[in-house]
Amino acid sequence: MLNPHFLMTLLVLVAALGAIARMVVLEKRPRDDLNPRLIPTTPVLLVSGFVALLAFIHLVNLVGVHTGR
């Protein structure tokens, strides 16, 4: 179960979840001025969520659950 594919996918999942958490914190923080942020939080949040979803599905498939046709 702890083969290299599983570990790499798990690391991608943890990184994506960390990016999601960081972007949510940046998004909810009150603004001090009207200058635009250097990192667009919404697109990064959406892409990180999609990557986390794909990594989770891949982990489920690696465990042995068949999720496709």
Image (cartoon, grey):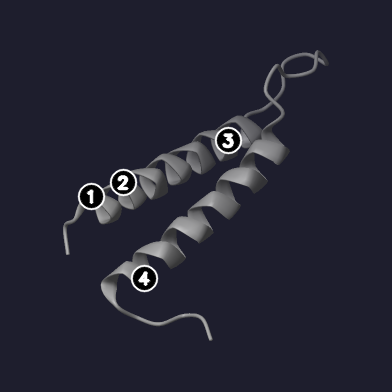
At a point 58% along the width and 40% down the height, the residue shown is 24
Q: Residue 50: which quarter of the image? A: bottom right
Disc 3 target residue: 23
Is residue 41 rendered to the left or right of residue 21? right
CB-based contact (under 8 Å), mark 2 and mark 4: no
| Mark in front: 2 vs 3 | 2
Residue 40 at x, y = what percent?
72, 28
Query: What amino acid type is highlighted by mark number 3?
Result: Met
Q: Alpha-carbon neighbours of circle 1 within 10 Å: few (<14), some, or many (≥20)? A: few
Image coordinates of residue 6 in percent, x first then y, are 27, 56
Q: Nearer the viewer, mark 3 or mark 4?
A: 4
Q: Residues within 10 Å of mark 3 (few under 14, many from 20)?
A: many
Q: Which residue is mark 4?
A: 60
The amino acid beneath tag 2 is Met
Query: From the viewer's perspective, is residue 44 above or below residue 36?
Result: below
Q: Position of residue 5 (x, y in %)?
A: 29, 53
Whether label 1 touches label 2, CB < 8 Å:
yes
Kind of residue indicated by mark 1: Pro
- Mark 4 or mark 3, which is nearer the start of the sequence? 3
Report the front residue among 58 and 30: 58
Helix, strand or loop at label 4? It is: helix
Residue 4 circle label: 1
